[in-house]
Amino acid sequence: MKLIEKIADLREEIKRFKREGKIIGFVPTMGYFHEGHLSLMDIARKRSDVLVVSIFVNPIQFGPNEDYNRYPRDLKRDLKLAEERGVDIVFHPDNREMYQENFQTYVNVEKLTKGMCGKYRPGHFRGVTTVVAKLFNIVQPDIAVFGQKDVQQAIVIKRMVGDLNFPVEIVVGPVIREHDGLAMSSRNTYLNDEERKQAPMIYKALKVAREKVKMGNRDAAKLKEIIESTIATAPLARIEYVEIVDDENLEPVSEVKPGTLAAVAVWFGKTRLIDNIYLMER
Ligand code: AMP
């Protein structure tokens, strides 16, 4: 496995692989790996000849009062885990390498970024789509794998790839969870013991809603209420949003139908957690 920090060096490698007709798989990450990240590497590994993983805590996707500075980082551990998972290249640029002085070009997906996380994290998705567009131009992958955990992100990236004609197939991997149902996230390390104990209530609430749907309840307003009241049984939980939306346009629905998702953002102390579930599969 190679660790590459410079764009020019990565381009050299990629040029060689392309000449050899190799299929390039790509998993963009901010590092501090958990099984969620590693599962995406497994998916990409199976479908490509060369597997590239990027580790870059992208400053432009964090708001001024967000956790950029304290975001957890452990490159040494990440490199070991990536190597064990059969990664060929880890691309780990620094901020100056990615954002040269006077950088001023951004990619923005207009409508899909208005609601849900976009409403509470202004500029976040603009930062995400900009860095992913840059990474796609640098890595030139044939396929790129993203997690369902960040469902709005995955849908926004698919839109960008379609709209801007990136020759990349986007694959979405399932949410990987801890044994108690909490969706894995690098940010889970921020939780104190009591917050960590209560956080699985998020997924419990989503499952309760899905059970109600299975029993015939299709009323989105009612299901939203059930999710909210279930999460509220965790005394430390502060709900940011609960949305029942269509998985293609992310618009709220009034009735659950195939492709309806329940998506939530919940604060525990200073930690913001997100999760989602299909109330009805497509
Ligand atoms: P991050 O390092 O948090 O930016 O995440 C990198 C990629 O891993 C994104 O595509 C995420 O959606 C994905 N990811 C994060 N957590 C999980 C999880 N628990 N299950 C599956 N994918 C995940």
Image (cartoon, rainbow, N blue to C red):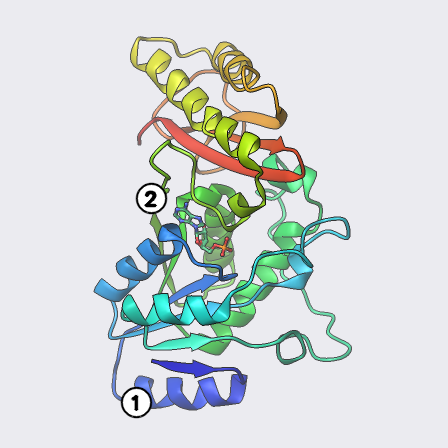
Query: Residue at point 62% right, 80% down?
Result: 97
Amino acid type assigned to the residue bearing label 1 in the image: Arg
Q: Quadrant of the N terminus?
A: bottom left
Q: Is residue 206 visible?
A: yes
- Distance from mark 2 CB to nearest ligand 1 atom below 8 Å: yes
Q: Quadrant of the C terminus?
A: top left
Amino acid type assigned to the residue bearing label 2 in the image: Pro
Element at badge 1?
A: helix
Name the residue beneath numbered marker 2. Answer: 174
Image quadrant where residue 120 sits? top right
Which one is in front, 56 or 49?
56
Task: Specify whether 85 is left or right of 141.
Answer: left
Mark 1 neighbour density, 10 Å: few (under 14) some (14–19) many (20 or more): few
Which one is in front, 106 or 89?
89
Which one is in front, 280 or 181?
181
Name the residue beneath numbered marker 1. Answer: 19
Q: Nearer the viewer, mark 1 or mark 2?
A: 2
In this view, the residue farthest toward the left is: 46
Mark 2 neighbour density, 10 Å: few (under 14) some (14–19) many (20 or more): few
Q: Is residue 163 above or below residue 189?
A: below
Which label is found at residue 217? none
Percent across and percent down for residue 200 are 45, 29
Query: Residue at point 35% right, 52% down?
Result: 35
Q: CA distance from mark 1 to mark 2?
A: 33 Å
